[in-house]
Amino acid sequence: MNKLLSITSSAFAFTALALSAQAATLISYDAGNNYSAEDSDFSRRATQSGSGPYVSTSAFSDSSALSPSSDYSGPTFYGGYQYTSSDVEGYLSRQQVRTNAAGDQIFLQAYRGGGWAGTTLSLHGIYLFKQQDFNSGYETGAITLDGINMSWTGYITAGDSEPSSFDGRIVIQTGGDYYVSDAVIDLAQNSGSFAISGSTLDSVQWAIYDPTSSFNFDAGSASFNDVSLDSITAVGLYFEEDGWTGSGGGSTSFGLGIKSFEATGSTTIPEPEHMGILLGAVCILGMLLRRRLGK
């Protein structure tokens, strides 16, 4: 009986191996893929309103794609953003997948020929990749997020009296709610990169975020807590600069180009190539039990 128990345990171990989480790339935006032949505008560009403050808003949506509707072959992305100038009229000049020597970047920029002196500026936005657009085999079911890897080019042009930051945070959706990370990404880098995975990602805490009510996430009043990463239905990037003083010498007040964004994850549902292992283990178990009982 002990021998039978040992054999049975071994067979179940094979079965467990086949059912164990299989890490994979869930979604990957990679500028090196040349998704567009030329600069391609977002399918939903910002509308302009106000006369001080001057506001440009592309309303948040997780049902109407933000990614270009033509001349674009990359992964679908959603979201929205808002850019405000308190006293100087000026709006977003680039809202597109921009093709250049550095690759096809998800790009936002505000340009004004006369500069931005004498005005206070702000920017808040979110880009999202939804599970329904994940790679084949991961569009449905329980997905555990286990890594984020991204790169970008970003800058803020500020007045001399007010050095400025440019922050990003990871966004996830689970249980129908959006959350942003307490981990902050410094987006004010002309060639920046960020990677997080494993126990480091597990230690991140999260605060609920509702972009439908306001793009601006107020970290000061937010409550960060542990959130399970085992049923992720969307992943992305939140970006913000709450307020900076425009520079008279800088015609471009900010630029943000997402060069790459990759999310990795796992599922306990066996992938097709692992089904053979599972079936084989079950068959072996059945034959061994049959032989043993026949003695």
Image: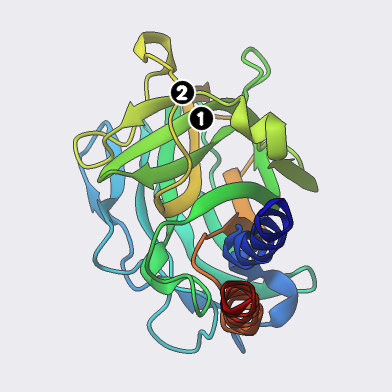
Residue at 44 percent across and 36 percent down: it is 123
Q: Residue furthest front?
A: 295
Percent position of residue 266, x then y: 58, 58
Tell me where residue 262 sits by quadrant: bottom right
Q: Nearer the viewer, mark 2 or mark 1?
A: 2
Q: Which mark is residue 181?
A: 1
Q: How many marks?
A: 2
Residue at disc 1, secondary structure: strand
The residue at which mark 2 appears reads as 226
Within 10 angstroms of label 1, few (less than 14), some, or many (20 or more) residues? many
Residue at 44 percent across and 74 percent down: it is 41
Q: Nearer the viewer, residue 213 or 173?
A: 173
Residue kind at label 1, given as amino acid type: Ser
Q: Is residue 129 above or below residue 145?
A: below
Percent position of residue 258, x then y: 62, 57
**Left or right placement of residue 238 versus residue 81 in this view:** right
Q: In this view, does 294 lie above or below 132?
A: below
Q: Which of 25 and 141 is in front in this view?
A: 141
